[in-house]
Image (cartoon, helix red, strand yellow):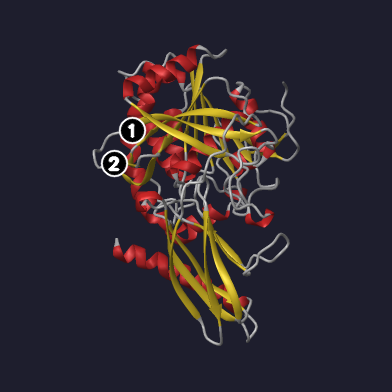
């Protein structure tokens, strides 16, 4: 393991050196490296905190020299930022917390700083705030819980008790929410603090016992028109908070009326945590299988939609394969709508798993893209095998499965989170949740021998 961590560090360093070689900074600029920690009440590490280098008297329209966010351990790093001699501040602000700043100066030599910030909870406004909708997301996780007098959270290591924790969380969605967007505070818009009328915010997390959890999920299922639930399992580099917000966004954008459930495994929530995340997702597979079994058996749902993203597919594929082949499990047919989005899985492993999962009543959609930079990095840095989510000439096409190539539509910078970040993909996902297999609106067939896959090339306008 130490060698693997060293390998990742070397890759990151080489990438930074290459970037510097391609775009050399002017001679008068000095490299500034700032690393550190952000803590909240009782010294608890805070994840998702925005840390930025700003001019001393920052105002709207001023240049932001560099920014980043803290990982699940509250750590941040800004490497070799070229800055001219002068005065600067490092500003830290987090969702639900105040802000803190520290000043530093750049002279005629490189700067290397280690800083620690301590943020206090932000005072909550009194009186009703109605310009947002609250989405309740149920969750199960094998992360370790951390708690203080004010809140409960889950961090990027496995539970010491080796058991699942259950509960629900409330996420606020602003009234001006745009389809396929997660509105968050942005320093580029001069926003240092979260505002529920503008941003999606994890408002609270409420742990429950297993029995209470399934009673609550069952109640949500029974009150829904279609008597259904959906289970979302996230990918690499995802904190519990971000995963909860993503689940709420999908729930809201899909107009889902059943029980939305997040299964959150202990991702480090860090770009440098890839190898640790690989170990963690493998370890969560058995728990995820048992959880899916419980959802099918104990919620009264007629349909359980499953959405797996990226590295989360490494737990979803074997879990579903094992349940499909279990003669003592009578409810596999409830998993009739399954989505594999950008799977970071060996191509052959994926194909073999689908052969087990595919049943006459099962609808399966695979989303791929040849512009998925995260999967390209996974392939070339860590794996010899092609990734199942890579599109182009390596697109996986199988009978009984709709393969949707989204390479031609716009996506996020890494081209990896299009399942939730692109409005056309979200609309296609909505059509699939409604039971529609390809052809669906916006899909163009591409023949590949006797089979075909589909390119998402046109705006999708889902029917009401």
Q: Is residue 259 visible?
A: yes
Q: Is the residue 3 above or below the residue 136 in the image?
A: below
- Give the quadrant of residue 179: top right
Q: Is residue 302 visible?
A: no
Taking the image as shown, residue 212 lies to the left or right of residue 178, namely: left
Considering only order in the chain, which callout, 2 or 1, is on the residue closer to the N terminus? 2
Instruction: Give me the C-alpha separation between circle 1 and circle 2.
Output: 9 Å
Residue holding disc 1: 165
Taking the image as shown, residue 88 lies to the left or right of residue 217, namely: right
Residue drawn where x is 38% and y is 20% of the image: 214
Q: Secondary structure at mark 1?
A: strand
Residue drawn where x is 39% and y is 49% of the image: 41
Whether the residues at callouts 1 and 2 have beta carbons within 8 Å, the answer is yes
Looking at the picture, how far across and down is residue 434, in whole percent? 62, 21
Residue holding disc 2: 159
Residue drawn where x is 55% and y is 28% of the image: 135
Q: How many marks?
A: 2
Q: Is the residue 192 above or below the residue 181 in the image?
A: below
Taking the image as shown, residue 457 lies to the left or right of residue 230, namely: right
Outermost residue, front side: 126
Outermost residue, left side: 161
User: In this orientation, which residue lies closer to the viewer: 96 or 303?
Assistant: 96
Classed neighbour count for the residue bearing mark 1: other residues with Cα under 10 Å, few (<14), some (14–19), many (≥20) = many
């Amino acid at each position: 393991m130490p060698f693997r961590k060293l390998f990742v560090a070397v890759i990151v360093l080489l990438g930074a050196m290459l970037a510097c070689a391609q775009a050399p900074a002017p001679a008068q600029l000095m490299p500034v490296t700032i690393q550190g920690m952000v803590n909240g009440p009782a010294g608890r590490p805070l994840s998702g905190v925005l840390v930025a280098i700003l001019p001393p008297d920052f105002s709207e329209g001023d240049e932001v020299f560099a920014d980043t966010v803290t990982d699940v351990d509250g750590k941040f790093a800004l490497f070799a930022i070229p800055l001219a001699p002068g005065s600067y501040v490092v500003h830290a602000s987090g969702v639900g917390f105040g802000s803190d700043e520290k000043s530093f100066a750049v002279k005629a030599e490189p700067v290397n700083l280690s800083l620690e910030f301590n943020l206090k909870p932000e005072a909550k406004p009194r009186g009703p705030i109605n310009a947002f909708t609250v989405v309740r997301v149920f969750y199960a996780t094998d992360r370790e819980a951390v708690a203080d007098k004010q809140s409960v959270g889950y961090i990027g290591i496995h539970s010491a008790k080796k058991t699942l924790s259950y509960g629900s969380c409330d996420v606020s969605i602003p009234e001006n929410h745009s389809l396929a967007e997660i509105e968050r505070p942005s320093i580029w818009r001069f926003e240092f603090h979260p505002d529920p009328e503008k941003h999606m915010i994890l408002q609270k997390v409420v742990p429950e016992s297993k029995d209470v959890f399934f009673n609550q999920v069952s109640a949500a299922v029974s009150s829904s028109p279609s008597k259904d639930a959906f289970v979302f399992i996230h990918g690499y580099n995802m904190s519990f908070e971000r995963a909860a917000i993503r689940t709420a966004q999908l729930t809201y954008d899909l107009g889902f009326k059943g029980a939305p459930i997040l299964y959150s495994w202990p991702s480090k929530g860090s770009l440098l945590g890839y190898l640790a995340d690989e170990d963690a997702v493998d370890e969560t597979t058995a728990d995820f299988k048992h959880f899916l079994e419980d959802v099918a058996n104990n919620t009264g749902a007629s349909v359980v939609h499953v959405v797996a993203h990226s590295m989360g597919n490494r737990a979803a594929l074997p879990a579903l394969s094992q349940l499909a082949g279990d003669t003592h499990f009578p409810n596999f047919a409830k998993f009739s709508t399954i989505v594999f989005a950008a799977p970071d899985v060996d191509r052959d492993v994926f194909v073999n798993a689908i052969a087990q999962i595919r049943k006459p009543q099962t609808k399966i959609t695979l989303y791929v893209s040849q512009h998925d930079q995260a999967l390209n990095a996974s392939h070339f840095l860590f794996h010899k095998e092609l990734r199942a989510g890579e599109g182009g000439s390596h697109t996986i096409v199988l009978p009984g499965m709709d393969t949707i190539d989204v390479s031609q539509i716009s996506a996020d910078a890494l081209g990896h989170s299009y399942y939730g970040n692109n409005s056309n993909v979200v609309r296609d996902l909505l059509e699939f949740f409604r039971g529609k297999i390809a052809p669906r609106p916006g899909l163009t067939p591409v023949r590949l021998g006797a089979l075909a896959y589909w390119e998402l090339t046109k705006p999708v306008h889902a029917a009401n």
